[in-house]
Structure formats: structure tokens, C-alpha cells
Amino acid sequence: MIRRRALAALGCTLLSPVAHAQSTTDPVLEPVVVSASRSLQRRFDAPAAIDVVSVDPFSAMSPLVNLSELVAAVPGLQVRERQNFAQDLQMSVRGFGTRSTFGVRGVRILVDGIPATMPDGQGQAATASLTAASRIEVLRGPMAQLYGNAAGGVVQIFTQDPPRGVTPASGRISVGAGSNGQQHITASVAGATEQVGALLDVSHFTTDGYRDHSAAERNQLAAKAVLHPSSETTVTATANFFNQPKSQDPLGLTRTDFDRNPRQVVGGALFFDTRKTIAQQQAGLVIAHRLSDSDTLNARVYAGARQVFQTLALSGAVANSSGGVVDLDSDYRGLGLNWNHKTRLDGLPLNWTVGVEADRLSQARKGFVNNAGVAGALRRDEIDSASNRDAFAQIDWQFAPQWRATAGLRHSAVRVGVDDHFITAASPDDSGGVTYRNTSPVIGLVWQHSDGLNLYANLGRGFETPTLAESAYNASGSGPNLGLRPSTSTQAEIGAKLVSGVHALDLALFDARSRNEIVPSSVSNGRSIFQNVDGAQRRGIEASWLAKWGSLTTRMAYTWLDARFLDTFSNAQNGAVAAGNKLPGAPAHSLYSEAQYRVSDAVSAALEMRAEARVFVNDINSEAAPGYAVLNARAGYAWQLGTVKWFLFGRIDNLLDKQYAGSVIVNDGNGRFYEAAPGRRVFVGLRAGL
């Protein structure tokens, strides 16, 4: 089930998020969040635009394979399911992250407090197991800068906690199947003794893919143990395994090919057998220790490894190419420590947090010639590294009965480097490194007008470093582009949160101006070269509404986003980009609406609508994916036989079988910008639990 809703804006007055309602007369309930202030508080009281999505893996009327299934009703957040498991989801917040062609950029991702975003700013969303999740928090705007190299926002996924106290073992199993050969099998088991509770969740998913050459297989395991060695200390241990042995890449389509047959595959994808395999293993510890009624220490330590093998649609045998086969072997680790203190000043609460964080990524990268899908001669051999050393402080002070101020500061030092091992007469030693430093201040103010209305305003500065992929090549020849500078942004936000009876309404108005925006300069022979441009602006309105009318629940989320370049610049591939051009991948209008009706305690059904305006696909705005509106339907039936609970669910996506581009590959060098969304598709699942 989903609890939440939130955000947006209204002229110069505003509001903020919402949650979930109970009965016709009960007020909308506010979930608890930690993302904004790093301590527990109601989402309604948080001095920022933040939404909470509650997840019940047993009664969710969805297969829980991709994050895009769960967050459609969060304004300001775009998560596009590309139908391409070789490239992961596309995720952006308020227009930050739209330029990423693979992985997640401009949005910081954490799972149970452990980063899923590497120190260089590149992250992965798919590795979080949704069948083990309990809630998702989405923080947007200036307050996100206190999490470091984030830019647009922070997405935190929290997995379920195991039971506490002596508890007999319980379990859950789920099987499901759907269109395009989808099959999903999951199982979980949990139990507890006096001091230790544990949970294990495993899942297996396969699909033939909507498009030709897009089959995939994914296996996941999530384990969690919570120990209580004393009444003051809680130790949470997590282990996650992600294995994707098969994910074919059909590549994007030109507009002509997309209009003619959206399910087709590019010929080069078949010849070069474009595909990716991924294996990731990670373990971590999070420790919370209460020093006193006023002081708490929180620590984290984690380590992991990730292996990626990918074949691209090019030979990579030409000069200045790094090969058409990529082999990455990464090790990463990190630690963090923060101290939270609660006190009172003039009889009113004052809380502060100070902390340090350090993370490191070491990535062995090799490139080979692609001989029709088989690795050939070595073309690249290097060790890439990225690390960060951060310190932060945050204070939350209620200085009057209806007023609260928040201020924070984070200093970051991010270093990226290359240790080149492929040295020949034609390829000199390209080793080198660079360190980026930035201090991000944030200040905010909240006025509690009444028990049901909060108004807030925030102002902050943030930064976004070039990723290892973006700084991999320079325009003058071989070697990394170490002259590429971080993008910096100044962000402002005003908002309001209103809870009244059966209604919850959130509004937010935001403006973000960036300098040294990182954009492509040229793409050739598989080499994407990036440059800094003078500036970009992202401004907009977010609004969400939730209401409970007895057995009927309705919700709506709308985003207006004006994301554009502020200055003219030159793109070596396409020519001049005019000032005022829209940022590619960022629709001006996005709307989600839903009506869910509970027929009885056992039966419920819902109808969803998603609409999106056209999306430009390149910086010069010469092409755009048309806007669209699609309908989805879902239903569930719950019953119990003896001690076993059962849940049967089904959903139909794209009910009217509309042809549209579900995602776009921005600035694709071959003009293959369009990735087709599936036509009408069905998924049916059955769950049983003790």
C-alpha cells in the first residue's frame, strides 16, 4: 500500500506533501521520515519537499520488479522503465539527471542508510530489492544538498525490519506471470529470538522483453539481521546480492523506425550481440547507540564488489577507440559517523547533528575489440578511482511556538583519478587525477500556521561532479578530461503542506540555477566527450492531493517544469545550441491520477492515469518524443484458509494499447533517441503468507 503524496507550489504561497487516509471522518495520517533532518519526525513537520511511499510486499497490486511501479504519484520525480534491463531505469528529480544515458546521475540513492550512489555521483536503482522494501523516501530541493554530491534530490529505500522478541518463523511466497514472457518468483522468511531478528528475501525474474533482443534475467537476495546487545544499542547487518546474467540491449530507434515498428531491433545490436551481465555483492553494518536521553551516535560501514561485462554496437577497432567490449571490475567501501543531540533552549526544542563520511570506489576497466559479440584485442586497461571525504553539521531550532529554523553546512572533497596500464607507442601514459572541493550551505524556515497547515522556505547551494564516465575522454586525443569542472547550483524553494479532514494537499515552487552545466560536446567511435556550459535554469511547480472518501481513495500529482539553457554554446556534433533551448529529457508537464475503490475488506480495484508532455531528445531541440496519456488498471483479492493468508492480484498496463516512447536516449550520436514503451500488457500474481 502506498502512503504519501506531496509537494508542489502555488504562486508565492505554497504547501508540501501528503500521506494516506483512514475513514471518512479521520484526518489524513502523516508517516514518519528521517531524510530531511536525519532524525525521526512527521513528514508534515519536515522543512522540505519530501514524500513517503509505503510498500507492503504482500498486498501490493504490482509485481515489484522496478522502482517505476511505486513512485508515479511523487511529483517532481521521473522514473522511466526503459524496457531495457541492460541500461537500468532513468531517474531524475526536478530536471536533474535527465542527461544520463545509463545508470542514475544527479540523484543520490541510499538503501538502509548505505549509499547506492558511488563517490563520483553515478548510481544504480535496480540493485535495491523491492520485494523486501517497507518504504521509500524522496527528498527534493535545497535540503538534499546536505547529502553531498546529489544536486537534484535524494531517494532512500528502507527494507522491512525483522520481528523483535521471541517470534516463530514466518514466511511468504509469491508467483506471477505476464505478457512478454514475464515470470517472477519471490520468497521470504523471518523470525526472531530475544535479542536477534532476521529476515531473508530472494527473488527471480525473467522476461522475453517487449522488443526484439531485449530478454533479461535477474536474481536478487536481501538479508537483514537486527541485534539488540543492550537496551541502548541496535546493530543492523545487511547483505545484498544482485545477479543479472542476461540482459540484451535492443538499442534506441530513430523516429522513422519507431513510427514504423516500435518493437524492432537495430541491426547493429544483432551483429554485435549488444548485451550486459551484472553481478554485485554488498554487506554493511549500521549501529545506533544511545549515549543518554539526549545523545545518539549512528555509524555505518559497508563494502561491496560489482562486475559488469557489456558489448556495445561498435567494433572498437578504429584509432582513438577504447573498444566495443567493456569489462569492469569494481570494489567499493565506505564509513560514516554522526552524533545527534537533543536539548531545549528557552523551553523549546533545539536539535543538532554533526558527522563525517568517507567512501571510495576502485574500478578496473578493460576494453576490447568487439568481433561480432566476442571480445578481441585489448584496447584499454586502467584503474579508475573515485573517493570522497565529507563533513557536515545541521541544526534544527524551534525558536518560537509556531516557528522553526533549520541550517546546515556540508564540505566535500571528491577525488577522481586514472592509473593507465595500456601504454604503447600510439597510446601514451594517460594517468592523472583531480580533486574537487565544495562547501554547501542550506538554510530553511517553517511556520506552523495551524495544526493542519505548515508553510516553509529553503535556500541552498549544491554541486555535482563529473562522473568517471563523463570525464573518461578529452577532445584533444587520448586520456581523461580532467579539466571538466563540477556543476554548481543555487536552489530556492517555498512550499506548503495542508491536512484538513479527509484531504491532504502539498504545493511547492522551486527555482534552481546552475553554472558549469555538464553537457555532451561530441559522440564518435563510442567516445562521449563532455564540456561545461555557462548555465541552466530549472524552475517549476509541484502539486499533490490525496483524499479518502469512505471506501474510495483518490490522489493526484502534477509537475510543471521549465528546464532550459541560459546561454548559447557550441556542440561539436550538432552546432550551436541557442539560449532558451529546453533541456532534453525533461517534460514540461507531468500528471498522475488514481482512484482506488475498496469493495470490501477482501476486494479492491484501482484505475491509474499517467500523462506527459512532449520531451525534446537533444540539446538543439531538433526532435521531440510526442506527449502521451495512458491508463492502467489493477485489482486484488485477499482471503485466508486456516493459518495461511492468500492474495491474488492482477494489473493491466497501457489499457488502451497506445504506442508511445516510454523513455528517450538524450543526445544519442546516431539519432536513435527513442525507446518504445510496451503496448497493452497483463501481469497476474498469487501470494501466500504465514
Image: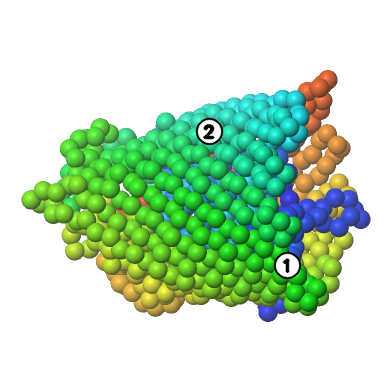
Specify the quadrant of the image occupied by residue 353: bottom right
Residue at image location 57% in from the left, 30% down from the top: 203
Residue ID for mark 1:
343
Q: Which badge, 2 or 1, is on the more N-terminal residue?
A: 2
Specify the quadrant of the image occupied by residue 606: top right
Q: In this view, does 375 lie to the left or right of 83?
A: left
Residue 538 position, x and y percent, is 52, 71
Residue 649 position, x and y percent, is 71, 33
Q: Which SS class for mark 1?
A: strand
Residue 48 appears in the picture as rendered: no
Number of other residues with Cα within 10 Å of mark 2, as a class: few under 14, some 14 to 19, many 20 or more: many
Q: In this view, does 134 lie to the left or right of 94?
A: right
Residue at image location 65% in from the left, 50% down from the top: 289
Residue ID for mark 2:
220
- The vertical placement of 464 against 66, above or below, is below
Q: Is residue 603 left or right of residue 131?
A: right
Residue at image location 40% in from the left, 68% down from the top: 437
Residue placed most toward the observer, 78 or 331: 331
